[in-house]
Image: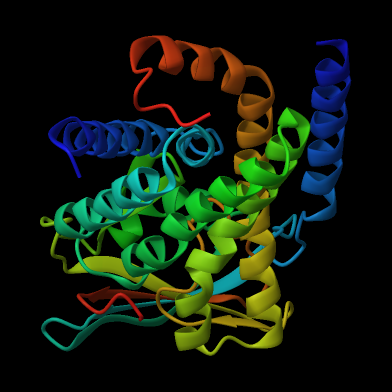
């Protein structure tokens, strides 16, 4: 039993250390004011609802930014085990979570040299915002794969 | 297969589905991989493998045919075969815990492979996706490692008492 306990303690230490090693700067947010761009497309009706609108924000994550601008962008988010989850943008709601259409987004960050197409980006609370970042929300049934 | 073997296989499938569903409510904490270790080590290879295949087919029926459900079908029955093979080589719980933990860590990335290949990600996006995945996989690794270390033996004893004809150890 003692041997097992030592192995368990060792495993916890190793995993905690690895967790910090695997921390990625790709999605860390930039402090202070920044300019970000938002595009909103309804691919079901093939309409662009918002085209590269410019916003100024101090929010460090995309989730906080959406919370801050929820009135302007008509955003509704619900809590999930993966953080907040966007269900409505521009007051257009995803009503059938089983079959879609859903709100998905693409993310582009020139400062991080990072481009993630629709369906590739992680949850809104995991995406840190940097100056000149662009987010494209798409109401679609295509999950990106 | 005899009737009691069929019944046991069906029960094993149901238990696996319940454990999987319970684990899907809490990120980082899951005992699904631990159950695969238990199945591989304590049940006949054919029975454990069949139960795991049935579980993945049940998942395809309930969650839909998608790259990730197909990867479950490809991956997890083979995990059971690996555990069934390892039990012939050693009886060390620490070895079981290390192998179970490592396979639990790998499964997230392996399941993600079709998405990574289809998405044709750039270097930065690929690295970001892998690193984010590793963070979740570390939770799975630790859960599986600790569960095998501390729960495997008591569970094995309980199984041998409840179903002595089924347990294969």
Q: Is residue B12 visible?
A: yes
Q: Residue at x 40, y 72 (%)?
A: A105
Q: Residue at x 73, y 60 (%)?
A: A30
Q: Residue at x 67, y 43 (%)?
A: B101
Q: Is residue A45 above or below residue A104?
A: below
- The percent coordinates of residue A90 (x first, y second) are 24, 64
Relative depth, front residue between A143 and A2:
A2
Q: Residue at x 62, y 32 (%)?
A: B143
Say left or right for A115 vs B112.
Answer: right
Say left or right for A134 vs A71.
Answer: right
- The percent coordinates of residue B99 (x first, y second) are 70, 46
Q: Quadrant location of residue B91? A: top right
Relative depth, front residue between B110 and B34:
B34
Q: Quadrant location of residue A41? A: bottom left
Q: Is residue A60 visible?
A: no
- The percent coordinates of residue B119 (x first, y second) are 48, 85
């Amino acid at each position: 039993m003692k041997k097992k306990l030592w192995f368990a303690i060792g495993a916890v230490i190793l995993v905690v250390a690895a967790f910090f090693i695997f921390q990625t700067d790709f999605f860390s947010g930039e402090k202070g004011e920044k300019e970000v761009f938002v595009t909103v497309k309804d691919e079901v009706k093939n309409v662009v609802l918002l085209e590269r609108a410019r916003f100024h924000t101090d929010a460090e994550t995309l989730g906080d930014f959406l919370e801050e601008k929820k009135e302007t962008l008509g955003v509704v988010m619900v809590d999930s085990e993966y953080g907040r989850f966007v269900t409505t943008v521009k007051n257009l709601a995803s009503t059938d979570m089983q079959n879609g259409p859903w709100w998905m987004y693409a993310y582009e960050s020139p400062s991080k040299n990072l481009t993630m197409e629709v369906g590739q980006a992680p949850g809104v609370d995991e995406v840190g915002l940097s100056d000149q970042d662009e987010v494209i929300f798409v109401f679609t049934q295509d999950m990106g794969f | 297969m005899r009737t009691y073997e069929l019944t046991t296989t069906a029960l094993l499938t149901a238990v696996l589905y319940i454990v999987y569903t319970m684990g899907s409510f809490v990120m980082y904490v899951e005992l699904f991989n631990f159950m695969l270790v238990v199945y591989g080590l304590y049940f006949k290879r054919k029975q454990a493998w069949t139960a795991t295949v049935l579980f993945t087919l049940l998942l395809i029926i309930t969650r839909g045919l998608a790259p990730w459900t197909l990867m479950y079908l490809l991956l997890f029955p083979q995990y059971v075969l690996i555990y069934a093979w390892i039990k012939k080589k050693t009886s060390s719980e620490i070895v079981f815990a290390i192998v179970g933990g490592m396979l639990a860590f790998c499964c997230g990335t392996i399941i993600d492979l079709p998405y990574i290949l289809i998405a044709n990600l750039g270097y930065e996006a690929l690295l970001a996706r892998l690193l984010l995945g590793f963070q979740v996989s570390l939770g799975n690794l630790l859960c599986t490692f600790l569960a095998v270390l501390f729960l495997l033996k008591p569970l094995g004893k309980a199984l041998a008492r409840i179903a002595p004809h089924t347990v294969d150890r």
